[in-house]
Image: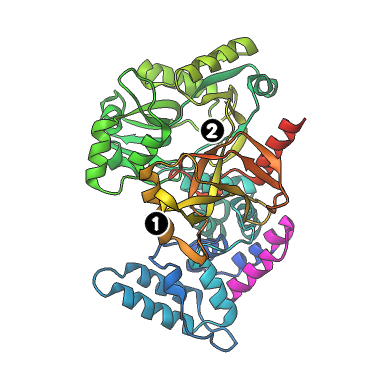
Amino acid sequence: MLLGEVAAASADLAATSSRLEKVARLSSVLAALEPDEVPIAVAYLSGALPQGSIGVGWASLKDLPPPAPAPATLALLDVHDALTGIGALAGAGSQAARRTALHDLFAQATDDEQNFLRGLLMGEIRQGALEGVMVDAISRAANVPRTEVRRAAMLTGDLGATATAAIEGGSAGLARFRLALLTPLQPMLAQSADDVLSALARISPAAVEWKLDGARIQVHRLGDEVRAFTRNLADVTDRVPEIVAVMRSLPLEAAVFDAEAIALRPDRRPHPFGLTMSRFGARSRKDLTEFQTDYPLSAFVFDVLHLDGEDLIDRTAVERFAALDERLPEELRVPRIVTADVEEADRFLDDAIARGHEGVMVKALDAPYEAGRRGAGWLKVKRAHTLDLVVLAAEWGHGRRRGRLSNVHLGARDPETGGFVMLGKTFKGMTDEMLAWQTERFQEIETGREGITVHVRPELVVEVAFDGLQPSPRYPGGLALRFARVKGYRPDKRAGDADTIETVRAIHERSAS
């Protein structure tokens, strides 16, 4: 397939808000691909590069050659090979070699292809081809049930591999995917509830457990080998040696645990959330060693997906909890009660918050582990308003913040368009360490400048606390955050995990009623 065909499909997707039309257009492209083209096209049409970051930023895409005349001639596989080669360049002279290779690639691309490539490299493909839409398209192209596609995607964490297996082998191809030890799978996600009363109105009786303000990790054990992964499936094993040691000491052969990593004080109260995230984001071995010395991590397990040869993801929560209680010592388990009583659950919530935790999770006792889904079986209850938002831009500071990128522009995810809706700005809550880090990081993902504003690829997620929402004609969503302040960056989350504009509007509607 030609790159131009993928670019044309991307333009068609961006031009419609109809989910059915998006699915039909995507499935027609997928059905026409050769097997080795499938994972590449799936990534491109999802707005991503299969290689991840290849070291191409805003400055690299200036002064490129004019577009080639139509018709398009660039093959999809040739583009993939060229970008892989660019990403592999390193060492002295690599920057010049990268610019030369980009020049050669863009010289072969038509105007539409250049625009598509530029958007792809800058992370600016916004066409609404989100994971749910892509799953439906794969199902239609391969003529297999959507549930089978979603389950395979859950287990692999890779839509490209899932699409290839479905199109090549149908249901039989998807059936070969099972939970693989030492390979991460997508975590189950939670919906929000206003309070314990509304949560128990939806799920009762329920398991109510502490919601720890740490970093979610998935820990795999096979024999003496232990690996730890963040919620976005990044391997952080070398950053959590104390957790690895504890997991290796357990009297079991194989397991997959869903857990929370949290830095604790000597009195077992949690350190601020940002310390845990800083530990995961340490930029050098020296930094990491200092974090390990000053802020040792503990792991608290709240679910089990595999235990000694048996997959448990399809078992009920009650069965999975029983397995945890039997095989893990109490000090490694997240505290939990089972109740239908609102007053008892409220007291449990008060106790969790008094101990420095974030709130509680309310979980259905009969729910399986719906990996990769924000299902109704888990509800999170917090007392303070917080949102996970995406950084869209930042402004150069002044005064003591001169030379630092400070005031961040915050956006909520729009599932309909695949883009982001700006809700306001804030410079509050930032430590000197955070300012230094974000000034460097923002320039690495810069897409352009306008006065004092540096626009960035929308890929960094930040947790923001706020006092409320107010109507505002200044922003396209019609709402603005009141007294927003940064709690910490979320390197364990991708932009696709950020809160949606629908969630923001629901918060506003509840507070206004």
- Please report the bounds of the magenta region as a residue range: 1-24
Give me the residue at 42% from left, 83% from top.
104
Q: Residues within 10 Å of mark 2 (few under 14, many from 20)?
A: many
Badge nearest the viewer, 2 or 1: 1
Give me the residue at 42% from left, 77% from top.
102
The percent coordinates of residue 191 (x first, y second) are: 61, 34
* Dominant secondary structure, magenta: helix
Residue 22 lies within the magenta run = yes
User: Which residue does the numbered mark 2 point to in the structure image?
Assistant: 369
The percent coordinates of residue 318 (x first, y second) are: 53, 20
Asked if residue 486 can be seen in this view, the reply is yes
Inspect the image, locate mark 2, and give the three-letter code of the amino acid beneath it: Tyr
Q: Residues within 10 Å of mark 1 (few under 14, many from 20)?
A: few
Asked whether 302 or 194 is in front, the reply is: 194
Query: Could you say whether the residue bearing mark 1 is in a helix, strand or loop?
Result: loop
Query: Could you say whether the residue bearing mark 2 is in a helix, strand or loop?
Result: loop
Give me the residue at 53% from left, 28% from top.
315
The percent coordinates of residue 45 (x first, y second) are: 57, 63
Q: Earlier in the sequence, mark 2 or mark 1?
A: 2
Residue 428 position (above or below residue 6):
above
User: Which residue does the numbered mark 1 point to in the structure image?
Assistant: 403
Asked whether 147 or 117 is in front, the reply is: 117
